[in-house]
Image (cartoon, grey):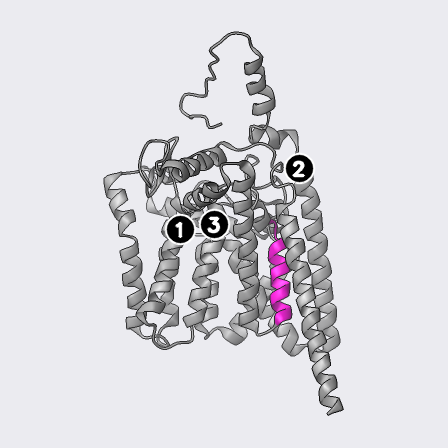
Amino acid sequence: MADLHDKQNLLLQHRRGWAILLSCVLVLGAALYISSIRNNPTGYYIDESSISFNAHLIAQSGKDEHGESFPLFFRAFGEYKNPIYIYLLAVVYRITGPSILAARLLSAFLLYTSALLLGLVAARLSGRRDIGLFILTTALLTPWFFELSRVVLEVAVFPFTLLLFLLNLRRVANATVWSWLNAGTIAATLALLTYSYSIGRLFAPLLALGLVFFLPRVKWRSVGRAWILYTLLLLPLFVFHWQHPNALTGRFHIITYSNAESSYPQLAWEFIKHYAGNFNPWRMVLRGDPNNRQVAAIYGVGQILVVTLVLAVSGLVVIWRDYRHEPWWRFIVYGLAVSAVPASLTKDYFHILRLAAMPVFVVLLCVPALGWLVEHKTKRAWRFACAAAIVLTLLQGALFQWQYRTYGRSSYRAQLFDADYPGGILSHAIAQTSRPIYLVDAEPIPGYI
C-alpha cells in the first residue's frame, strides 16, 4: 500500500509539474504576442486602415464603405478583400468600438491560437505531452507566425483556418466511412480556408483533391460527400464571380508573370523557378522575404527557426522510411508541396503572405523526427538532443524578438506604416488658421484615416 501511495504521489507531482510548465509557456507566449502590439509596428498601414474601416461600418450599419449590405467580398482601391477576417473584426468592434489595439489583438489571438492548435495536433499525433509542448513553444517563437500576428491583414486568419481543417481531418483519418456530418465538417473548414485569403481559392481545392490519399482506407463515397458539400459551399463564390467579372482575378493578373505572349514552355520554366525559390532554405532561415516593403516582415530576417527546419527535413526522412504508407503523413507532405503552388504563380519569390500555409506544415513535420528520437535513442541521448533543441530554439527566438523590436520602430517602418500622419501631416493641417482644410490623397488610391 505504501508503494502504491508513493506512486500516486509521484504521478500527481508529475502532472502538477506539467501543468505548471504548460501554464508558464502559455502565459509567457501570450505576453510575448501582446507586448507593444499597439505601437510595433508603429503607425497603421493603408490595408490595415481599409480593413478596420469596413469592419467598423459593418459593425455599425451592416454596410461597407460603398454602401453594400453584408458583402461577400469587400471592394477597396481596385481589389476585393476577403470576408472572414473583416467579419471577425466587425464582431470585435461591435463589442469594443473601433481601435488599432482591438484590431491587432484579434490578429495576435488568431496566431497565438494557431500555435496552441499546432501543439495540440502534435501531442495527439505523437501521444506525448513533451513533444506537444515543444511544438507549441516552437510555433510561438517562429518568426513567420509572430510577424503575421502583428498586422491587421486577412492572412492573419489563414493558419488558424488551415489548422481547423487539419484537426477535423485528423479526427476522421482512421475511419473507413465518413458520415455526412464528418464530411460536412471537412467541407466547412475547407470553405473557411477558401474564403479567408486569396491564395485559399487555389490552395483549398488542392487540399480537397489531396483527400484521395485516404483511399482505399476511406470509401469513395465518403470522399465524394466531402467534395459535394465543399462544392455547394463554394456556390456563393461562383455566383459572385459571375456577377463581378475579374473582381477576384484582377489582382492576380497584375502580380502574375503570365501574359498573352507567354508560351507554355516559358510558363512551365517560370513556375519551376519560382516553386524552387519558394523552398529556398537560405530564405527560410536567414534572409526571409526579399521585398523590403513587405509590411508583415522585417527585412533580411529568416522566417523559420534553424532547429525547426532541421527537424522538418529529418521528419521527411522518417516519414519516407517508416510512414510512407500512412495516409495522414502522405497528406501532410502533399500539403507542404502544394502550399507553394499559389505563390509560385506570381512574380515574387518567397512572398511570406502568399506562402502563409507553409510554416504550418513545416512545424508539423518536426513531429516524426521528435518521435523517432524518443523511440530510438537512449535516455541520455534524448535528453541531450532535446536540451540542445530547446536552447537553440530559445536563443534564436530571443534574437528574432530583439531584431523585430529594434527594426519595428525604425524610421523606414514608420514611413511604411504612415506613422507620421497623426503627429506630422494631420497636426500641421489642423494648426493652419484657414478653413476649411482639404487633405488630398493620391488619386488612384483612396486614403483611410
Residue reaching furthest to the bottom: 1
Q: Amino acid at mark 1?
A: Gly
Q: Which residue is mark 3?
A: 157
Q: Which residue is mark 2?
A: 407
Q: Evaluate whether residue 209 shows in this view.
A: no
Which label belongs to residue 200?
Answer: 1
444 or 368: nearer the eye? 444
Q: Give the x, y percent position of residue 62.
A: 35, 39
Residue 446 quadrant: top left
Mark 3 crowdedness (10 Å alpha carbons): few <14, some 14-19, many ≥20: many
* Quarter of the figure with the N terminus: bottom right
In three-dimensional space, the C-alpha distance between marks 1 and 2, rounded to whole angstroms, equals 30 Å
The stretch drawn in magenta includes residue 132: yes
Q: Measuring 73% from the left and 71% from the top, which residue is drawn there?
A: 383
Residue 147, placed above or below residue 167: above
Q: Which residues are magenta?
A: 129-143
